Each structure stands twice: as C-alpha cells, then as structure tokens.
Image (cartoon, rainbow, N blue to C red):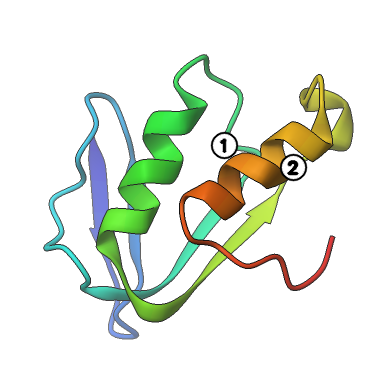
Amino acid sequence: MLLTESPFDIMLCLLGPLQVPLAAESVDVVVFCLALMGSNLLDFLVEASRVLKLGGILMIAEVASRFEDVRSFVNILGSLGFKIISK
C-alpha cells in the first residue's frame, strides 16, 4: 500500500488488501478515478462507505463501458446509502 499525506489533509491510498488505515467516519470526500476495475468493486464501495463521515461525498470518475449494467451499479450505490447527485 502506498500512503501519501499532504499539508491539505489529502491522503492517497493505493489498496492491496482492503481496509485503509483510516478510522470509520473520518473523511469528508472519497474519490475513485479509474479505480473500480477489479472484481472486488463492492469491497471498495463498502470501504468508502465505512470511512466517509455522515454527509460525506463519494466521487467516481469511470468510463461507462467498464460496467456491464450502469443501472445495476447505481442501484448498488443506493443500497450502500449513497445518493446520486449527477452522472
């Protein structure tokens, strides 16, 4: 795992085994940028849900063709408590 901190409280985590070294409900924003390519996509989303503060923001930048069924992916996000603001 690569872990980098900045003076702006930005932390980059390149995950191997899941569960980032962050406390539950400890971050305001989680960003996935071309990072949901693995077969354990649900694990990443669950971990994002775990570390986000109540009202936190999950930002995802992925190519639509990566998903077999975008609607199903959106439904998974909803089942984890995320509200879709824009696509």
Evaluate if marks 2 and 1 touch, with contact meaning CB atoms under 8 Å apart: yes
Q: Which mark is residue 11?
A: none
Q: Which mark is residue 62?
A: 2
Dot 2 amino acid type = Glu
Q: The N terminus is located in which quarter?
A: top left
Q: Cα distance, mark 2 to mark 1?
A: 8 Å
| Quadrant of residue 45 within the rendered picture | top left
Q: Which image quadrant: the C terminus?
A: bottom right
Q: Where is residue 75? Give x, y as percent.
A: 67, 43
- In the picture, measured across the screen, residue 26 lies left or right of residue 78, that is left
Compare marks 2 and 1 and give the one earlier in the sequence: 1
Residue 72 on image: x %, y % = 73, 33
**Quarter of the image where one finds residue 67:** top right
In the image, what residue type sits under mark 1?
A: Ala
Residue beneath label 1, please?
35
Give the left or right position of residue 22, taking residue 42 as reference.
left
Q: Kindly state the secondary structure of the residue where label 1 is placed.
A: loop
Residue 9 x/y as whole percent = 29, 80
Find the residue positioned furthest to the top: 39
**Which residue appears at 19% of the width and 40% of the height?**
19
Which is nearer the eye, 61 or 56?
A: 56
Q: Is residue 56 above or below residue 43?
A: below
Mark 1, Cα crowd under 10 Å, few <14 / some 14-19 / many 20+, is some
Q: Residue at x 51, y 14 (%)?
A: 39
Badge 2 marks a residue whose secondary structure is loop
Q: What x and y, as percent, mark residue 44?
A: 41, 37
How many labels were placed on the picture? 2
